Image: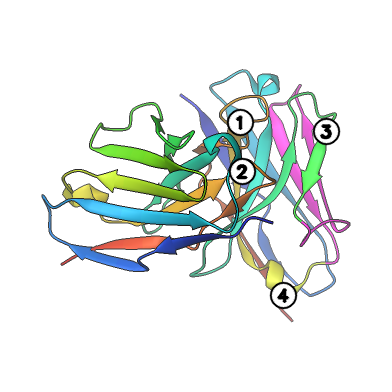
Amino acid sequence: EVQLVESGGGVVQPGGSLRLSCAASGFTFDDYAMHWVRQAPGKGLEWVSLISGDGGSTYYADSVKGRFTISRDNSKNSLYLQMNSLRTEDTALYYCAKDLLEMATIFDYWGQGTLVTVSS
Amino acid sequence: EIVLTQSPGTLSLSPGERATLSCRASQSVSSSYLAWYQQKPGQAPRLLIYGASSRATGIPDRFSGSGSGTDFTLTISRLEPEDFAVYYCQQYGSSLSFGQGTKVEIK
């Protein structure tokens, strides 16, 4: 059974940093691209970032480019999101999501999310 | 960037009725790279349809997707009580974007 468990969320001041983690199990982790997708309170879904299975390719939404860094450790079946220079508009529930294929950008499994609140 | 517009914003129907949800793209979605997700309150989204019409693993056949180019439709043939939720479309043909969602509520 595929499981994705996010952690690392919390309350941070504007300009601060936070590192999110996602522990994956139930599938061959390095065979699949992984994503972060966020959802602001009461709002829709916004894709944040993508990393290929081998970690060699990364992509970002324009809204986070230059501030967020996605990475993975395939030996630990873990995905990460380093978030710097946080803004109030980054407040959201952050989901870790598995790609249906290597880089299809279709999300077939999701974690339950970790909440990030950026507030002074 | 391709903008996806979903309609209606809210659909009020009774169990057993047919639901038809629309997703319109601001430009053509290449190769019908369009997916649909269902999200219930307090839960993560669930993949229903990808490639415009392929059902994801374990999705009941009352859910079907159709369309191409700029106009796509998700149809739920007979609504079950567990189908009342918010539905999002997503295109992955040119970068990646989501629609704003359609809420299917009990009438």
* Disc on the earlier residue, 4 or 1: 1
Mark 1–mark 2 contact, CB under 8 Å? yes
* Dot 2 amino acid type: Cys
Query: Residue B63 lies in what quarter of the image?
Result: top left
**Cα separation between marks 4 and 3:** 28 Å
Residue placed under numbered mark 4 in the picture = A88
- The stretch in magenta equals A62-85
Say which element carries label 3.
Answer: loop
* Dot 4 amino acid type: Thr
**Cα separation between marks 3 and 2:** 17 Å
* Side (left or right) of B74 relative to A12: left
Residue at image coords 55%, 51%: A113
Return the mark for residue A109.
Answer: none
* Disc on the earlier residue, 3 or 2: 3
Q: Nearer the viewer, mark 1 or mark 2?
A: 2
Residue at image coords 28%, 53%: B20
Q: Chain of mark 4?
A: A
**Cα separation between marks 4 and 1:** 29 Å
Return the mark for residue A96.
Answer: 2
Residue placed under numbered mark 3 in the picture = A57
Q: Looking at the picture, how far across and down is residue A19, in whole percent?
A: 77, 52
